[in-house]
Amino acid sequence: MEELTEIQKKQIKIIVHYGEDQQLEKLVEECAELIQAIIKSKTIDDNVVEEMADVKNLLEQFELTQIRLGETIAFIVKTKVDRELGRIKQNA
């Protein structure tokens, strides 16, 4: 297993301190803020990037503290990417 980076250690401290329930609520809030930022700007501006970082930070907290969650997400992402590329190839 790889050694954790300093930022990963800090992310673990944060989710342990606040607890998963509170961080899930925070994730909902941050996702809503990201959606609103995208709707408002219709581009990837500084505000959208800031909100993306907030969402990514919370997602990483859960990946670090739940066994195999990161692996499961990576597998699902690969499956979805492959499926979409298959659709693109069919329509080409």
Image: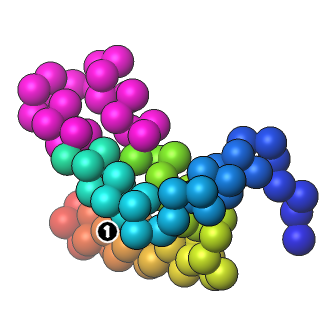
> How many numbered discs sit on the rendered protein?
1
Residue in the image at 89% along x and 58% along y: 3
Compare residues 75 and 20 and report the one nearer the observer.
20
Please state if 86 lies on the left or on the right of 14 as rendered. Answer: left
Please indicate, yes or no, whether residue 12 appears anywhere in the rendered image.
yes
From the top left corner, tell me how far across and down residue 35 is, in percent: 18, 43
Residue, far top: 46
Q: Quadrant of residue 16?
A: bottom right
The amino acid beneath tag 1 is Glu
Please indicate, yes or no, whether residue 78 appears anywhere in the rendered image.
no
Dot 1: within a 10 Å radius of its alpha carbon, few (fewer than 14), some, or many (20 or more) residues?
few
From the top left corner, tell me how far across and down residue 56 is, in percent: 47, 48
Compare residues 51 and 19 and report the one nearer the observer.
19
Indicate whether residue 35 is drawn in magenta: yes
Please state if 1 lies on the left or on the right of 85 as rendered. Answer: right
From the top left corner, tell me how far across and down residue 39 is, in percent: 10, 34
Query: Which contiguous range is marked in magenta?
Result: 33-54
Q: Is residue 82 above or below residue 28?
A: below
> Label 1: which residue?
84
Compare residues 40 and 27 and report the one nearer the observer.
27
